[in-house]
Image (cartoon, grey):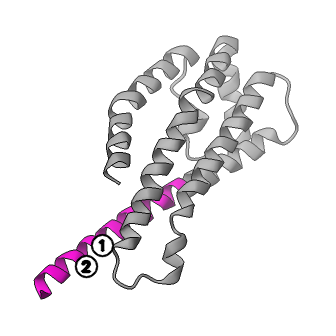
Amino acid sequence: MILTLAVMVLFMITVLPNQAASAEHTTGSHQSPDTSFFYSPGDLLQMADEYGEKGREAYIRSRWTFDLLFPLVYVSFMAVGISWFIQHLNYPPDWVGYANLLPILGGLFDYLENSGTSLLMSLYPDLVPGLPLFTSIISATKWLLVGGSFLIYFILAFVALYQWIRDLIEN
């Protein structure tokens, strides 16, 4: 758990800021489908247009380099952490044992979003019918799963800490 926490913190401190600056420089926009909780199909098409050909190429390259690694980092951090906290709970309900699957689903939806936006960016201005809508729904689902995973992570951490302190006081 400590290793995944360290990798996540290092990634957030070193890689993410550099990646964000690089993405804004190469696309010419501070907007990105990956960082938007929800975007409409029209918003996505507007981003593709504003990026221009070079920006779209850079966006696709980023999805299949940096953004192959980042989901592995945050999924590992959350799935390992959630599993660790569950193991340290006193009498957890049965359903809690499946909570570590939520970040894995979030990572899968992240890869689905990357695939959809990459396809859209590579074909733009030609369109695959329904792809902008599909991608925007996938993106919102990804954020709900990732956000829910972080929420579960911190709730379980709080409960495990509370139980640990309570056990120390009682013993």
Residue with the mark numbered 1: 160
The residue shown at (33%, 36%) is: 10
Q: Is residue 64 visible?
A: yes
Amino acid under disc 2 = Gln
Q: Is residue 165 above or below residue 63?
A: below
- In the rendered image, the quadrant that contains the C terminus is bottom left
Q: For the view shown, which residue lies furthest in the right direction?
A: 129
Q: Nearer the viewer, residue 152 or 29?
A: 152
Q: Tell me which secondary structure the magenta stretch mostly adopts.
A: helix
Rendered location of residue 113, percent (x, y):
67, 41
Disc 1 and disc 2 in contact, CB within 8 angstroms: yes
Q: Tag on residue 108? A: none
Secondary structure category for the residue under label 2: helix
Secondary structure category for the residue under label 1: helix
Rendered location of residue 135, percent (x, y):
72, 43
Q: Is residue 152 above or below residue 116?
A: below
Bounds of the magenta span?
146-171
